[in-house]
Amino acid sequence: MTKLVQHIDEMRARLTQTSTNEQSLVKSLGDALNHVDQQLVRDIRRVAAEHEARRAVIFNELQALACSIGVFQPPPEMGIVPQQNDGPYFPAVGDWRQATMNLSYQDEFEHQLNGKGGQH
């Protein structure tokens, strides 16, 4: 019976040692997972900050584009253009009416340059 008690004591000692080793491994795994989680959170924050920076640059570019849309500088020879019966008309920067007139003048000018002047 003493051998049986001795075997049981040996098994108990091994089980205690195995349990201690397993607890140590589980703690190490938990620490490693916490470290990876913290690194992931840092990486996500960095990517989010970079995204916001790119978004701000794009937004500023879009605002600049929006501000410049419709801005047509009148040609220097254009001056005061009479407008119906209301008196002189000063086209504003970005006036679509003046821009369409400029386009039709440009078409006529190109038509003349191509040697087709007077022939329609």
Image: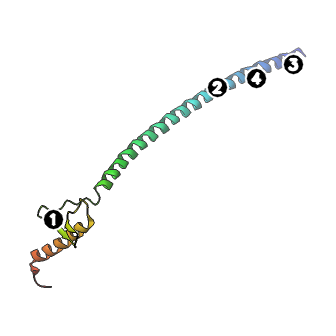
Residue of label 4: 15
Relative depth, front residue between 79 and 94: 79
Q: Earlier in the sequence, mark 1 or mark 3?
A: 3
Disc 1 to disc 4, how far (Cα)? 102 Å
Residue 118: assigned label: none
Locate the C terminus and report the quarter of the image it occupies: bottom left
Q: Secondary structure at mark 4?
A: helix
Is the Cβ of the residue at disc 1 closer than 8 Å to that at disc 4? no
Judged left or right of residue 102, residue 32 is right
Residue of label 2: 27
Outermost residue toward the front in this view: 86
Which of the two discs, 1 and 2, sits closer to the camera?
1
Residue of label 1: 80
Residue of label 3: 4
Q: Secondary structure at mark 3?
A: helix
Q: Earlier in the sequence, mark 1 or mark 4?
A: 4
Disc 2 to disc 4, how far (Cα)? 18 Å
Q: Give the amino acid at mark 4.
A: Leu
Measured as percent of width and height from the top left, residue 47 is found at 45, 40
- Quadrant assignment, res 50: top left
Measured as percent of width and height from the top left, residue 42 is found at 49, 34
Outermost residue toward the right in this view: 1
